[in-house]
Image: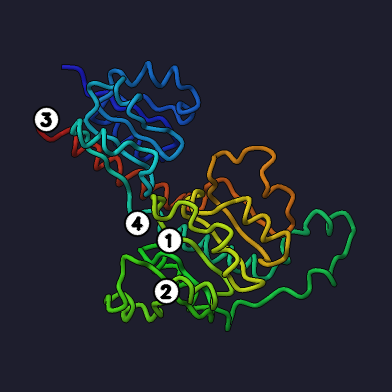
Amino acid sequence: MPRPFVLIAEYMDDGGVRALQQDFAVHYDPDLFESPAELHRLIGGARALIVRNRTQVTAELLARAPALRVIGRLGVGLDNIDLDTCRTRGIAVHHAPGANAQAVAEYALAMTLVTLRGSYGATAEVAAGAWPRAALGNGGEAAGRTLGLVGFGDIGQRTARLARAIGLGVVAYDPAHGPDAPVWQSSGVECVDLPTLLARADAVSLHLPLNPATRGLFGRDTLARMRPGAVLINTARGGIVDEAALADALRRGHLSGAALDVFAHEPLPSGSPLAGLPNVWLTPHVAGLTREANRRIGTQVAEQVRNSLSSPA
């Protein structure tokens, strides 16, 4: 009997790939998501599909995979997977909650420090002989300031622990946790509503899923309610932030800086309103990507896929 076919369409840690190769026929191409025709050809015989966030697992793609039993998502969010069709078809969907939480929390704190200080973008000038010391010598310290976390799940809670360790005060808003939820007492973080958070926070870091309630949440009105001179960090999902409105708030000086790792459209299209702004830091959806996180994610997803394919149909 031929071994079940596992199709891996995006980057997976070598350890996870090797673990699957022990029991299954594996086709691994980290760039397969960029070749839709080849993906459509290969998925026809796949019993398992493993993706990150670039592969759009739509109803159309799933219709080309009659043998598919399981999808492994190398990460946390599932907004690129048609979960309704998976439920109807009985396709199991596994992801890796918590596996990259530390990586994202460290990124969120690091970019909070970078944006508050505002002094780290002059490498090329200094290397060329310029000395913009006066212009860059009035950045802010983090200690004594307030970090507002919008979303207080695992990543938000880890970010809070790191932030408090260096002297940041932390407030958080999360509609999933009522004011009496145990997490507030155990974390020592103050629970507030969103308007209060926006009014108090010197830095706002987003840790929300993308859904109808959060899409466009940080548009012009919400951004306008942030403290003058505050900074915004987004490691969650790009669709939560109106990028044109954010660019306008940065140009006008209402916000002093922003760091974005996620965007409404990825890769970020050329001509983005965020392009060319001196007070914004952009990275290509890498907050959760570290060597350590990749190993944890690969191991966890490989084990989940193996268990699904090994169980009775």
Disc 2 from disc 3: Cα separation = 46 Å
Q: Residues within 10 Å of mark 4 (few under 14, many from 20)?
A: some
Q: Which residue ends up furthest to the left in the rendered image?
A: 312
Quick check: marks 3 and 4 in contact, CB under 8 Å? no
Q: Which mark is residue 98?
A: 4
Nearer the N terminus, badge 3 or badge 1? Answer: 1
Disc 4 from disc 1: Cα separation = 8 Å
Q: Residue 302 at x, y = what percent?
A: 29, 40
Disc 4 from disc 2: Cα separation = 25 Å
Q: Which residue is mark 3?
A: 313
* Image quadrant in which you'd find residue 53: top left
For residue 197, side relative to residue 131 (left or right): left
Q: Which residue is mark 2?
A: 193
Q: Which residue ends up furthest to the bottom in the rendered image?
A: 144
Q: Secondary structure at mark 2?
A: loop
Q: Which residue is mark 1?
A: 102
For residue 224, side relative to residue 5 (left or right): right
Disc 3 from disc 1: Cα separation = 35 Å
Between marks 2 and 3 in the image, the one whose residue lies nearer the viewer:
2
For residue 312, side relative to residue 269 (left or right): left
* Image quadrant in which you'd find residue 101: bottom left
Q: Secondary structure at mark 1?
A: helix
Amino acid at dot 3? Ala
Q: Residue 273 at x, y = what percent?
A: 68, 47
Amino acid at dot 4? Gly
